Image (cartoon, grey):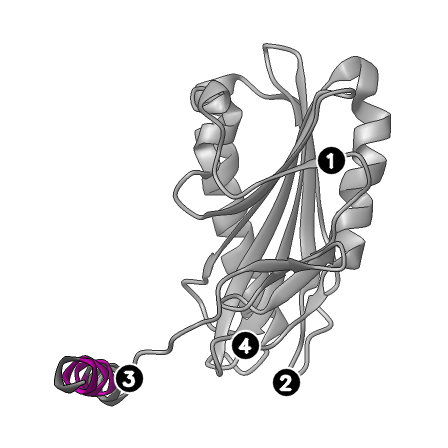
Amino acid sequence: MKSIVKHLMGLLALSLLITAAGCTIYSKPRIDNYNYKNFEFEFKFKIPNGWVCHSNIPDELAKSVAAEYADNFVFMLTNPQTEGIILLTAEKSDFDIISIGYNKDILKEKLEAKIAEWKARLDKRYGFQDYTSQLYPVEISEGYGPTLVYSETATSEAGDNYARGYLLNKCRKDQTCTVQVTLISKTPQYEKNYEVFSNVVNSLTKVYN
């Protein structure tokens, strides 16, 4: 009995120490009623029918374009029939919307700089062609949920079609986080996979820890 009490007191002390240090304990991501929920980055989306869920990048994809997203990886969907891959990554943004006072011009400049850096890296490594991109009007107010601000499409030298949606989301109390949804698909099934990718992007909504 004493050992159990001692163990519980130790856990309580650890919990108080974490709280005092300003750390937040987030609920683990989970799937409820075909919805993937991520509580650290505060988003959820509807899992499409026929797609396989992965909490890690499979070994067979470790050297593909998918490996580019390993650092901020949170979830992946694959479809054996259409050979489609949809990756979700998330991170705390290096700019904060609140701190710049929702200034759309500053936000646009920062986004354009980040986009140029991202495109150059992928272009150098995979030889992307037919690159197209679109910045959307920034309609963000305090307490916003996942908001699509940028999208792009391209084709790699290997013949893979690529699409990405870049969303901003208020998370972790008063921080700005990004959620990126990326599609990788062979050309014959691209339109079918792109439709699913669009549905995933459009289904992204807010969820709280």
Mark 4 is surrounded, within 10 Å at the Cα level, by few (under 14), some (14 to 19) or many (20 or more) other residues, namely: some
Question: Closer to the observer: label 2 or label 3?
Answer: 3
Marks 2 and 3, how far apart at CA: 23 Å
Marks 1 and 3, how far apart at CA: 38 Å
The disc placed on residue 209 is 4
Horizontal and vertical percent for residue 185?
A: 70, 23
Marks 1 and 4, how far apart at CA: 26 Å
Q: Is residue 151 above or below residue 153?
A: below
Horizontal and vertical percent for residue 45?
A: 72, 57
Mark 2 is surrounded, within 10 Å at the Cα level, by few (under 14), some (14 to 19) or many (20 or more) other residues, namely: few
Quarter of the image for the C terminus: give it. bottom right
Residue to which mark 1 is pinned: 51
Mark 1 is surrounded, within 10 Å at the Cα level, by few (under 14), some (14 to 19) or many (20 or more) other residues, namely: some
The disc placed on residue 22 is 3
Residue to which mark 2 is pinned: 142
Q: Is residue 66 or residue 128 the one in the foreground?
A: 66
Q: Earlier in the sequence, mark 2 or mark 3?
A: 3
Q: Earlier in the sequence, mark 3 or mark 4?
A: 3
Query: Looking at the image, which residue is at 81% across and 19% down?
Result: 189
Secondary element type, mark 4: loop
Q: Is residue 197 above or below residue 40?
A: above
Q: Earlier in the sequence, mark 1 or mark 4?
A: 1
